[in-house]
Amino acid sequence: MENNEIEVKRLNDPTIVELKQKIKVGLELSFKNLVKHKRQTCGTFVFSENGLIKKIKAEDMPE
């Protein structure tokens, strides 16, 4: 078996897939909580898009 085949099998391992899903859900919940907190404190988010800095009010962020 080649290294690429082994790597693909590892990525498709059910425990790895489940772990990735749990991490994704955790990150989504964390971001939702961050947005909620920023809305309560009238905060803003600062993003960089193609090298341009953008400030977005938390209340303008979609839920």
Image (cartoon, rainbow, N blue to C red):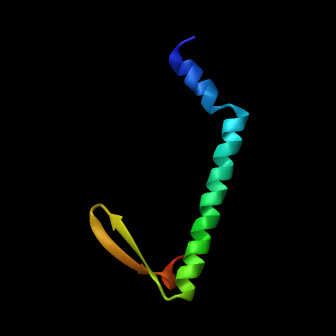
Residue lying farthest to the top in this orientation: 1
Figure quadrant of the N terminus? top right
Residue at screen point 52% across, 17% down: 3
Viewed as shown, does residue 25 lie left or right of 35? right
Residue at screen point 61% across, 62% down: 28
User: In this rendering, is residue 30 above or below 5?
Assistant: below
Looking at the image, which is closer to me, 34 or 58?
34
Residue lying farthest to the left in this orientation: 51
**In x, y percent, where is residue 38?**
52, 81
Viewed as shown, does residue 61 lie left or right of 11? left
Residue at screen point 67% across, 48% down: 21
Viewed as shown, does residue 52 lie left or right of 45? left
Looking at the image, which is closer to me, 31 or 60?
31
Residue at screen point 30% across, 71% down: 53
Residue 48: name its quadrant: bottom left
Figure quadrant of the C terminus? bottom right
**In x, y percent, where is residue 16?**
66, 37
User: In this rendering, is residue 21 above or below 13?
Assistant: below
User: In this rendering, is residue 4 above or below 45?
Assistant: above
**In x, y percent, where is residue 55?**
37, 78
Residue 29: name its quadrant: bottom right
